[in-house]
Amino acid sequence: MDRDHSRLIIILLSVIAAVLLFGREATFGSMQTIFWVALALGIVALIVWAIVSSTRYMGREARAYRDEVRRDREEGRPWLHTYIAWPGIIGNLLVFVVAAYWRFIDDSCRALMGDCLQQIPYWWAPVCLLLASIPIAGLERMIAHFRKPRAID
């Protein structure tokens, strides 16, 4: 017999012995409790793993992004608009999450992007930041275009 099969036989024999010693209801109740506790602990462990791995991933991406911005700045490519766009993107996501939560807890909110959004103070600030990054990017590209050395034919 294989080791895995002998372990399975030991587990089955221990369950049979528990049923004989404690009764069927007590054994199955205990097994059900153990199952639900293990499931809850597994879900908590999965959530913690997801948070830790996403935090590590974002840290790696932030380091790579800083290097990319440094390289763009050294090579004279446009880079300043990203420092204005990213707070706008993160702010818009945060405002959307708060509006969704507000709609969940408040019955007077009918539309997520209407009533609920209007209740958040300064909801328009991240939108303005994001929209302000567009002309700044264009201005940076125009400045970079005129700074390029031209070859004389």
Image: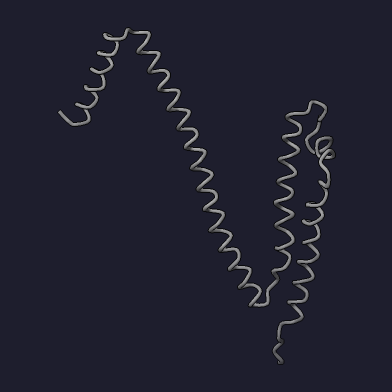
Residue 87 x, y percent position in the rendering: 72, 56
Query: Closest to the observer: 109 or 78?
Result: 109
Query: Closest to the observer: 119 or 64?
Result: 119
- Asked if residue 120 lies left or right of residue 68, the reply is right
Residue ranking furthest to the front: 22
Instruction: Name the residue at 70% across, 71% down.
Output: 78
Q: Quadrant of residue 4?
A: top left
Instruction: Name the residue at 48% across, 37% down.
Output: 46
Position of the C terminus by quadrant: bottom right
Position of the N terminus by quadrant: top left
Residue 140 x, y percent position in the rendering: 76, 71
Residue 57 x, y percent position in the rendering: 53, 53
Residue ranking furthest to the bottom: 153
Q: Is residue 152 above or below residue 19?
A: below
Residue 64 x, y percent position in the rendering: 56, 63
Instruction: Name the residue at 31% across, 9% down.
Output: 22
Q: Quadrant of residue 133?
A: bottom right
- Asked if residue 28 lies left or right of residue 66, the reply is left
Q: Quadrant of residue 100?
A: top right
